[in-house]
Image (spheres, rainbow, N blue to C red):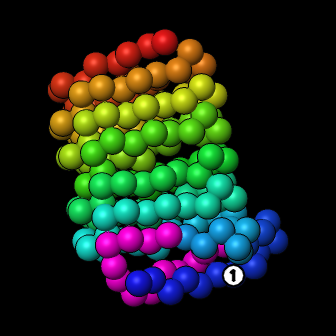
Amino acid sequence: MYEYYYKKQDFGMCLTEAKGEGEEALIPADKDILIVADDIFKGHKELVRVEFPDTVIEIGGFVFDGCKNLKQVKLPANLRDFWQYAMTRCGIEDIEIPGSVTRIASFTFNQCDQLTTVRINEGTRKILSWAFKDCNNLVDVYLPATIEEISDKAFEGCPKVVLHRK
């Protein structure tokens, strides 16, 4: 069970800390959280499932770094931005990225060894350098028609990857 701590910022409510442990983290929807700060769940190896409310528009860096058993993440429908290394070295196997995320930042999914499938929804425009660096088992990436730019290094270290365009 996690206990959540918040801070009111100029831009809105920020989730600043999650204390405790458990397999499941369901971020409360009643706080109108806009931002999830860096490192919130970093190193929580016991974490298996996370669900964000749709109010969240930004997920900070290293949020799931080292969460090796993390298998399911429900991203908020209104998410605009992942910071670098947000999902690095976590155990996620597949992920659906909402179209409200216009760009996938460098190193967002760095070294996600279990990641096999990525579904990117309509609206996303760019995939930056090393966004999926060293995701050794990444096979299928489903791209929307809205993709305008994919860095030639976006999938560096992903020897099995196949890009499927709509």
Q: Is residue 20 magenta?
A: yes
Q: Is residue 11 magenta?
A: no
Q: Quadrant of the N terminus?
A: bottom left
Does 95 appear above or below 160? below
* Residue depicted at x 27% and y 45%: 93
Residue at the top extreme of this rendering = 166
Q: Say above or below: 59 vs 15.
A: above
Q: Amino acid at mark 1?
A: Lys
- x, y percentage for residue 106? 44, 42
Left-right relation of 82 to 109? right
The residue that label 1 is drawn on is 7
Looking at the picture, tell me which residue is in the foreground, 8 or 47: 47
Nearer to the camera, 27 or 129:
27
| Region rendered in magenta | 14-26
Helix, strand or loop under label 1: strand
Q: Residue at x 37, y 62 (%)?
A: 49
Residue 112 in the image: state x and y as whole percent.
Answer: 27, 48
Q: Residue at x 81, y 71 (%)?
A: 10
Query: Where is 145 relative to 48, above or below?
Result: above
